[in-house]
Image (tube, rainbow, N blue to C red):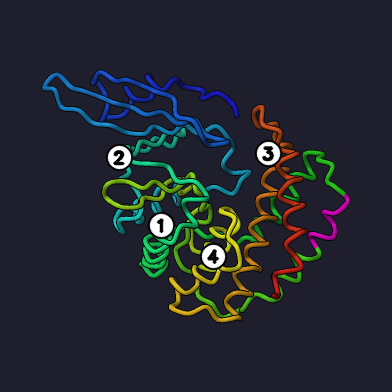
Amino acid sequence: MTRPATSPATILELMPTTRGRAASITPLSGGMTNHNYRVDVQDAAGSRDSYVLRLTGADPGSLGIDRLSEIACSQAAALAGLGPELVEFLPEHGALLRRFVPGRVLSPDDIRQPSVLERLVPALRRYHEGPPGAGRFDVFSTIRSYHAQAMACGIVFPNSMGDALEELVRLEVQRPGNDAPCPCHNDLLAANVIDSPNGLRVIDWEYAGMGDRFFDLGNLAVNNGFTPEDERRLLELYFLQAEDRDLRRLRRMRLASDLRESLWGFLQAGLGAGTVDYHAYGCRHLERFLQGLGRAEG
């Protein structure tokens, strides 16, 4: 991850919300491409507020991130009670300020707990059923874009990548063609879910846009190690029943999510992003994609 071009303190002085207020700035862990800081501010009258400042550390265009769409989706999520309030955005500095959400960042083990799923899945469905939003996310075109860019960067892929891309074509052909897109998050890692005193809050809407609800469901499942029983429970909470055809769709998108994550890693390696071994990251997700092929139709 590259260092931000402008210091957090300088950015805070450019934002009306924090300008002239004494600030305590604490780096936050987590996040592979951005820099995040907790910002606690106080003014002369003693008013206190807490925020999270995010500074972009990667080329958003190469990764298919549209910052204006991200802002619109973040605002929609806040209105729906699913995301934190967005406070400031300085696109020229790649800087975003949102309200700090107190609470516990969840783990994959937490996400799989029935008590968490029973709150998260209905909230996610309400967001999916909300007003049409900004941006567009299609996992198949995203994978092809990442692959083409990584090739242009000179990345050497494992020999199995050819087989994986052939399977991708099959997965795309099997996708129903009559589903209307809906607002989606598209990056449902456990680390993006906070259990706060006011309920679950989902953060990091970089890849959000109008897309396929089954991608969100498959992405949630694969990122959090869902078992077949967890998958059925997920669909029962979402649709009130778990039909075999929906299980197959979820599992196909679960596969597509892993291949997207793999190509994301290879592209990051090609872009020379930071000190993370992104090539190894891409290989791990590619292997998991290949291992998951046998159960997608089960």
Nearer the observer, 50 or 245: 245
**Residue 69 x, y percent position in the rendering:** 45, 52
Which one is earlier in the sequence, the residue at label 1 or at label 3?
A: 1
- Secondary structure of the residue carrying tag 1 is helix
Q: Residue at x 15, y 27 (%)?
A: 47
- Contact (Cβ within 8 Å) of mark 4 with mark 2: no
**Residue 98 x, y percent position in the rendering:** 34, 39
Which one is earlier in the sequence, the residue at label 2 or at label 3?
A: 2
Nearer the observer, 228 or 172: 228
The range drawn in magenta is 159-165
Crowd band around label 1 with a 10 angstrom C-alpha radius: few (<14), some (14–19), many (20+):
some
Crowd band around label 2 with a 10 angstrom C-alpha radius: few (<14), some (14–19), many (20+):
some
Q: What amino acid does circle 3 point to? A: Gln
Which one is earlier in the sequence, the residue at label 1 or at label 2?
A: 2
Image quadrant holding the N terminus, namely top right
Magenta stretch: helix, strand or loop mostly: helix
Q: Mark on residue 230?
A: 4
Nearer the observer, 234 or 186: 234
In the depicted structure, whether residue 160 falls above or below residue 131? above
Which residue is labeled 3 in the image? 268
Q: Nearer the viewer, mark 3 or mark 4?
A: 4
Image quadrant holding the C terminus, namely bottom right
Alpha carbon separation for disc pair 2 and 3: 29 Å
**Residue 179 x, y percent position in the rendering:** 53, 77
- Contact (Cβ within 8 Å) of mark 1 with mark 3: no
Which residue is labeled 1 in the image? 116
Q: Mark on residue 87?
A: 2
- Contact (Cβ within 8 Å) of mark 4 with mark 1: no
